[in-house]
Image (tube, rainbow, N blue to C red):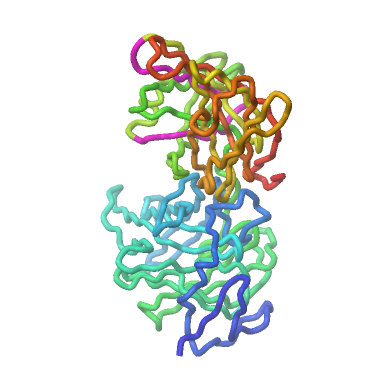
């Protein structure tokens, strides 16, 4: 007999009532290993601290540090664990996952670095675990990778790292990777109030972690507080938490491909008196987030850097920007060869609708690059409107543009040439956009310039959750 305990919004069987007590043994000791993933729309974060699984934060930049002493073969060791939600994503078994990095030091020496892959089931708020990459260190050198696994490899399947509903007594597999010897599992054994370093945390979920590889071994007891995350792990206790960095609110929607016939130069203008550090968050066109990078710009100066040198061999498509408002970021696009003039493009912020003036497509082209800033796939439409405000044609530019994915469009591929008409671009998710006009392909001189859009609808993509 296999006992099924549906997590989140589904009915749970064999559970005790929610209470600040330890549950009785449920379901004869079975751990749920089948989950209704087909009912899930997965996201890598929700964009809001208040609209996600409060016990397992996946907002980029969220950071925790735990410290404590542990005894190993009679010797007391000082342990420090840092958990950082990176602004990186990775596709695992067909699902875009958020990368969470854990770093552990023993007596000040780096011992382990793991990159863990998680995604949120939007409906239930269950946080699924899709695997991890693990590096163990000795004297500063990587010596082992044991414990690494990925869903979809060696018949491994995703588990649940944190249920969307905290119900005392529920048991669930966190890892289902038999061949990789990764079979961790969790049991919610209580809800309590817990004081750490003078701070009282309420409704703390107490979870006993164990492994099916050693069923008789004592479980590790971990504690998770709402809107904080893990606050205690055996003898390790929370010593600090907060934002290591904030998610971008400014965007550069387009970096030209290295083989696309154009070059991109990134220009940073610091109007302030002090040096400032800008953080760039690069993405691939499919929405995959890459490692962030910091650039320091001296006060009252301009820095220009070739995008190919900045990003190297990575085919970076667009990037987010975090930093001082005194420092403005521009891009310049220019034909790679032959005479021509560059287009100067300023950073963009979140919007939900814009209006563009159509050019004469017999001599120029109108193109746009649009980045979905939402946490779910976006539908993007465009409507051609005549000078009397009547709709001429409406097209769907994208039915499901991936979160943080980019759409490249030449409008003449979708609409008939009708100089003087307007093009209205709308989406059900906030987006960043740059619109360019250029001489037609094959012209003796290649010229690009910005076709500045008019905002039709402004929307807020605030990382604190004030989305409108």
* Image quarter (top left, top right, bottom left or bottom right) of the N terminus: bottom left
Residue 49: percent from the left, percent from the top? 65, 52
The residue positioned 54% from the left and 67% from the top of the image is 39
> Considering depth in this image, is 52 or 261 the residue closer to the camera?
261
Task: Tell me: residue 120, above or below residue 281.
Answer: below
Q: Nearer the viewer, residue 160 or 371?
A: 371
**From which residue to which does the magenta span run?**
314-338
Q: Total number of numbered labels?
A: 0
**On the rendered structure, is 152 left or right of 343?**
left
Image position, residue 4 (x, y; %): 52, 82
Q: Is residue 136 visible?
A: yes
* Left/right of residue 244 with respect to residue 216 in the rendered view: right
Answer whether residue 446 is magenta in the image.
Answer: no
> Would residue 403 be seen by someone viewing this image from the given angle?
no
Q: Position of residue 389 (x, y in %)?
A: 72, 29
Based on the picture, tell me whether residue 336 belongs to the magenta stretch.
yes
Q: Quadrant of residue 228?
A: bottom right
Residue located 41% across and 25% down the image? 307
Up-down: is 452 above or below 215?
Answer: above
Residue name at image x 39 percent, y 71 percent: 176
Image position, residue 210 (x, y; %): 44, 75
Residue at 42%, 69% in the rendered image:
175
Rendered view: 451 above or below 368: above
Question: Is 147 in front, or is 200?
Answer: 147
């Amino acid at each position: 007999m296999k006992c099924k305990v549906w997590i989140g919004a589904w009915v749970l069987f064999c559970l005790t009532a929610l209470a600040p007590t330890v549950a009785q043994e449920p379901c004869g000791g079975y751990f749920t290993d089948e989950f209704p993933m087909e009912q899930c729309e997965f996201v890598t974060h929700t964009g809001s601290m208040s609209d996600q699984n409060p016990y397992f934060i996946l907002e980029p930049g969220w950071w925790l540090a735990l410290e404590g002493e542990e005894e190993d073969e009679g010797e007391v060791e000082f342990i420090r664990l840092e958990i950082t939600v990176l602004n990186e994503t990775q596709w695992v078994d067909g699902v875009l996952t958020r990368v969470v990095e854990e770093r552990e030091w023993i007596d000040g020496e780096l011992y382990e670095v793991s990159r863990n892959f998680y995604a949120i089931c939007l409906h239930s708020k269950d946080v699924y675990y899709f695997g991890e990459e693990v590096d163990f260190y000795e004297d500063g050198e990587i010596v082992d990778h044991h414990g690494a696994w990925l869903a979809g490899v060696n018949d491994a399947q995703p588990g649940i790292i944190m249920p969307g509903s905290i119900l005392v007594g529920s048991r669930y597999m966190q890892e289902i990777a038999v061949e990789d010897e990764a079979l961790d599992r969790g049991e919610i054994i209580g809800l309590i109030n817990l004081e750490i370093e003078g701070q009282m945390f309420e409704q703390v979920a107490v979870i006993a972690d164990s492994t099916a590889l050693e069923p008789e071994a004592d479980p590790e007891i971990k504690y998770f507080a709402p809107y904080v995350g893990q606050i205690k792990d055996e003898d390790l206790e929370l010593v600090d938490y907060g934002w290591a960095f904030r998610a971008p609110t400014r965007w550069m929607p387009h970096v030209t491909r290295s083989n696309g016939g154009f070059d991109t130069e990134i220009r940073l203008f610091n109007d302030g008196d002090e040096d400032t550090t800008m953080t760039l968050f690069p993405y691939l066109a499919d929405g995959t987030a890459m490692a962030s990078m910091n650039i320091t710009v001296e006060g009252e100066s301009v820095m220009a850097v070739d995008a190919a040198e900045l990003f190297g061999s990575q085919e970076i498509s667009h990037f987010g920007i975090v930093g001082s408002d005194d420092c403005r970021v521009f891009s310049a696009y220019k034909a790679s060869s032959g005479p021509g003039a560059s287009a100067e493009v300023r950073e963009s912020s979140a919007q939900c609708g814009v209006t563009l003036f159509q050019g004469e497509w017999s001599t120029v082209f109108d193109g746009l690059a649009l980045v979905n800033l939402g946490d779910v796939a976006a539908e993007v439409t465009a409507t051609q409107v005549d000078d009397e405000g009547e709709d001429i044609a409406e097209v769907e530019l994208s039915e499901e543009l991936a979160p943080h994915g980019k759409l490249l469009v030449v409008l003449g591929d979708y609409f008939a040439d009708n100089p003087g008409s307007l093009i209205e671009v709308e989406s059900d998710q906030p987006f960043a956009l740059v619109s360019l006009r250029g001489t037609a392909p094959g012209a003796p001189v290649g010229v690009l310039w910005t076709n500045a859009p008019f905002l039709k609808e402004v929307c807020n993509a605030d990382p604190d959750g004030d989305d409108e």
